C-alpha cells in the first residue's frame, strides 16, 4: 500500500517541468474494461503524476470502480486516486466505501458532494443519513485514517452557488477541513482559472498555497463539444466554438479531421498558457482513450522517454 500523496507527487515528480495526470471512468462491461486497460498501459509509459477513477452516480459502478482502482494500485506503477461522492449515500455507507478502498490499497481520495444521478443540473437532495456539503465528507475521511484528500474547485463557480464569493468560501472550507489540493471543473478560458487562484489566496493566504490543478479535455468532434459543455456545466467560449465550426466547414458533412486537429490545437494552447502561468499539474479527462491527450502532451514536449530530465 503506497503512502505517497498527490501533493508529494507534485512536489517530487521527476522528468517534466509541469507534471500531468489523467482521469478514467469505470467501464460498463468487459469490452470497456479491456479498452480501459489498453489506455492505462499507454499512459503508464508517459509516467503521469497520478491517475483518477470517477465514481458512478449514486454508486452505480461501485464494485467495479473499487476493484479496478485497487488493481491500478497493485498491477501498475501508477498512483491511483479514487473519487468518493456523497450523493445517495449515508455516512455509514461512505465509511464502508472508504474502508473498501483502503482494503484495496487506496489512500488517495478525491472527495466530492456529487451531482444528482440522471440530471447533473437537477435538485440536489441530501441523503437522510448523509452529509450536506463536501467539507463534512473531508472531515469524515480524515478521521478514518491516514488518507490524502483532494476536492473539486470551480473556476466559474458551481452552478448552485449564488456568486463567486460564496463559491470561494466553500472551497476554502474544504481546504481547511483537511484537503491537500483541488482539481478544477473543466474550463476553456484560462482567465477563469487564474481568477480562481487569486480569490482563494485573497480569502485565505495559508490555504491559498495548496495546489489548484486545472482540468482539461481535448475536443475531437462537434459531438464532443456537447459532452464538454455537459461536463463543465457552461457553454464553450464563443471564440473557441467559432474556431471549431470554421474547421467543420460549411458543407453537408463535417470535416471531422479538421475539427479534431483544431481541437488538439486549442487544448495545446490552453495547456501551454497554464504551464506559463505556473499551474502545478495538467489533469486531462480522457474518456478512457489515450490518443488525443497523448497528442497534446507530445505537442507540449512530453515523451515516454523523458522521465529524468526537465523539459527545456
Image: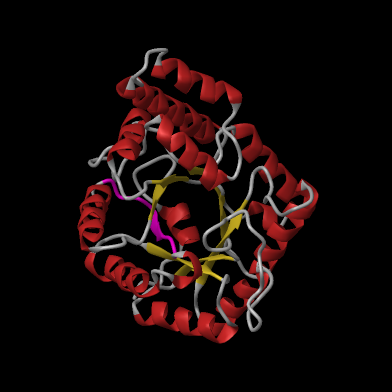
Q: Is residue 3 above or below residue 213?
A: below
Q: Which image quadrant for residue 222?
A: top left
Q: Locate residue 308, reporting x and y percent.
A: 30, 45
220 displayed left or right of 233: left
Q: Nearer the viewer, residue 142 or 240?
A: 240
224 on left or right of 199? left
**292 vs 60: above or below:** above
**In magenta stretch: residue 65:** no
Mainly helix, strand or loop, the magenta region?
loop
In this rendering, the answer to whether 281 lies above or below 36 is above
Q: Residue at x 61, y 40 (%)?
A: 234
Residue drawn 40% across the image and 22% down it: 262
The answer to whether residue 302 is visible is no
Q: Kindly tell me whether residue 285 is visible in this rendering.
A: yes
In the rendered structure, which segment of residues is drawn in magenta? 46-55
In the depicted structure, whether residue 152 falls above or below residue 270:
below
Q: Position of residue 240 (x, y in %)?
A: 53, 24
Q: Going 71% across and 54% down the picture, which residue do you hit?
A: 160
Amino acid at each position: 500500500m503506497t503512502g505517497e500523496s498527490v501533493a508529494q507527487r507534485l512536489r517530487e515528480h521527476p522528468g517534466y517541468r509541469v507534471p500531468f495526470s489523467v482521469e478514467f471512468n469505470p467501464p460498463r462491461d468487459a469490452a470497456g474494461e479491456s479498452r480501459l486497460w489498453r489506455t492505462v498501459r499507454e499512459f503508464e509509459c508517459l509516467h503521469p503524476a497520478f491517475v483518477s477513477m470517477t465514481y458512478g452516480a449514486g454508486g452505480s459502478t461501485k464494485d467495479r470502480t473499487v476493484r479496478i482502482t485497487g488493481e491500478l494500485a497493485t498491477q501498475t506503477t501508477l498512483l491511483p486516486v479514487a473519487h468518493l461522492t456523497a450523493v445517495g449515500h449515508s455516512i455509514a455507507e461512505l465509511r464502508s466505501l472508504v474502508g473498501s478502498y483502503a482494503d484495496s490499497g487506496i489512500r488517495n481520495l478525491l472527495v466530492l458532494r456529487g451531482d444528482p444521478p440522471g440530471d447533473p443540473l437537477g435538485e440536489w437532495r441530501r441523503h437522510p443519513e448523509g452529509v450536506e456539503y463536501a467539507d463534512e465528507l473531508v472531515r469524515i475521511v480524515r478521521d478514518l485514517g491516514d488518507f490524502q484528500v483532494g476536492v473539486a474547485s470551480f473556476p466559474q463557480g458551481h452552478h448552485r452557488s449564488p456568486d463567486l464569493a460564496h463559491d470561494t468560501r466553500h472551497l476554502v472550507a474544504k481546504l481547511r477541513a483537511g484537503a491537500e489540493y483541488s482539481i478544477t471543473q473543466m474550463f476553456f478560458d484560462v482567465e477563469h482559472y487564474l481568477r480562481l487562484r487569486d480569490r482563494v489566496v485573497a480569502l485565505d493566504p495559508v490555504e491559498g498555497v495548496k495546489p489548484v490543478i486545472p482540468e482539461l479535455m481535448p475536443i475531437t468532434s462537434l459531438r464532443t463539444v456537447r459532452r464538454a459543455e455537459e461536463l463543465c456545466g457552461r457553454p464553450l467560449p464563443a471564440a473557441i466554438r467559432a474556431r471549431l465550426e470554421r474547421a467543420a466547414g460549411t458543407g453537408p458533412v463535417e470535416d471531422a479531421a479538421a475539427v479534431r486537429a483544431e481541437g488538439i490545437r486549442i487544448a495545446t494552447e490552453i495547456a501551454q498558457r497554464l504551464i506559463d502561468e505556473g499551474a502545478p499539474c495538467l489533469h486531462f479527462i480522457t474518456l478512457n482513450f489515450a490518443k488525443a491527450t497523448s497528442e497534446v502532451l507530445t505537442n507540449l514536449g512530453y515523451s515516454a522517454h523523458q522521465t529524468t530530465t526537465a523539459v527545456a
